Amino acid sequence: MQRNTARNFIFTLFAFLLAFSVHAEKLPNVTILATGGTIAGSGATSTTTVGYTAATVGVQQLINAVPELSKIASVTGEQVFQIASESMTNEHWLTLGKRVNTLLAQPNVDGIVITHGTDTLEETAYFLNLVVKSRKPVVLVGAMRPGTALSADGPINLYNAVLIAGSQDAIGKGVLVALGDQIHGARDVTKTNTSTPDSFKTPELGMLGYVQGPKAFFYHATTRKHTVDTEFDISNLSVLPQIDIVYGYANMNPVALNAFIAAGAKGIIHAGTGDGSVAAKVKPDLVAARKNGTVIVRASRVGNGILARNGEANDDELDFVVADTLSPQKARILLMLGMTKTSNTKELQRMFYTY
Ligand code: DAS
């Protein structure tokens, strides 16, 4: 009888320990890739919210500053770059995109958070939205105030981003952006204010959800292709086509356009006034550029709305591409990736209506 009791006790203890260890291991594995920016910035005083230095704090310090992370994920940190994001380059993007794909191919990585400066965060997010080959969550996060400032937003933004990256609900949603308790999609989010904490918005087309307490809540999903459904592959690329943006304004002239082309631009995003209008002084040079093989995409400086094909220019006749609803800075990214596959303007236009 005593031997049975002892055996039952040992079996019960073993079963409990097994169950506990399984539960403890259930925390998602999230890798934080740090690139710099304000979220890693520091200022001279607690009220320095502008005029601070970005990209001074390392990834482990960012993680140590939010001990609550250990309750929601098993976090690993990597310092990929340490730059202010206005200095992000195509080469940085290729390095980051390849690292993300390598990590997400590992079964022991459930999601990735990328800490990033806010100036080009929306661009990096959209680039990754087009090149990441996994359905696992990738969440970009930044801050509008350095960690040294009163009411710094970096720590809670980082906590929320890790929560989303470990969330089953975030799987298959495309690359996400998390600031201010909000969840935005990479395609349509944009920075709308130079300095206030509510800067990131998805005007008109709408953000995807919120983070509240210990959970990510999704209410929308993008209708455009992303991640595993895209046709772009950077695995064997070491350089991306040079695409530049010319900005439309009253009294515009073709000097910048011609300078970009002379410097070797393979494509031009024309960020026109209104519905992508082309100034009379610029049109002859834009038409000539197209005839000489430069791909021309008509976009708008306005910020919202569909760029209508054959609206402000006869795109069919001039063989221009239109940017649909993409901002000029995101149209540049799609054209750049598109031209790694083709220069055919009909194929490129299809891409602008697909992604
Ligand atoms: N210079 C800005 C950048 O690195 C700082 C920031 O807002 O993150 O994007």
Image: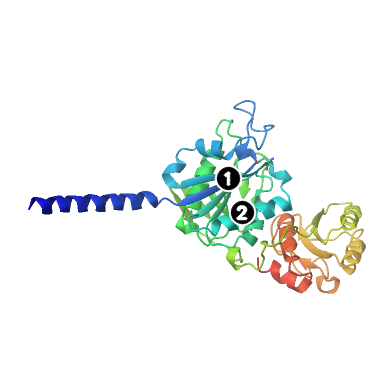
Q: Which of the two residues, 78 or 322, is positioned nearer the viewer here?
A: 78
Q: Quadrant of ligand 1?
A: top right
Q: Which of the two residues, 315 or 95, is positioned nearer the viewer here?
A: 95
Q: Residues within 10 Å of mark 1 (few under 14, many from 20)?
A: some
Residue lying farthest to the front in this orientation:
3
Q: Residue 313 is drawn in which quadrant?
A: bottom right
N-terminal label among 2 and 1: 1
Q: Residues within 10 Å of mark 2 (few under 14, many from 20)?
A: some
The kind of secondary structure element at disc 1 is strand
Q: Quadrant of the C terminus?
A: bottom right
Q: Residue at x 45, y 52 (%)?
A: 28
- Establish if 45 lies above or below 132: above
Q: Residue 259 is drawn in which quadrant?
A: bottom right
Q: Which residue is mark 1?
A: 78
Residue lying farthest to the top in this orientation:
45
Q: Which of the two residues, 265 or 27, is positioned nearer the viewer here?
A: 27
For the residues labelled 2 and 1, the Cα–Cα distance comes to 10 Å
Identified by mark 1, the residue type is Glu
Q: Position of residue 179 (x, y in %)?
A: 57, 46
- Establish if 203 lies above or below 311: above
The kind of secondary structure element at disc 2 is helix
- Establish if 157 lies above or below 305: above
Identified by mark 2, the residue type is Arg
Q: Position of residue 175 (x, y in %)?
A: 58, 57
Is 71 left, or right, of 261 in this rendering? left
Is 175 left, or right, of 241 in this rendering? left
Q: Position of residue 248 (x, y in %)?
A: 83, 54
Q: Which residue is mark 2?
A: 99
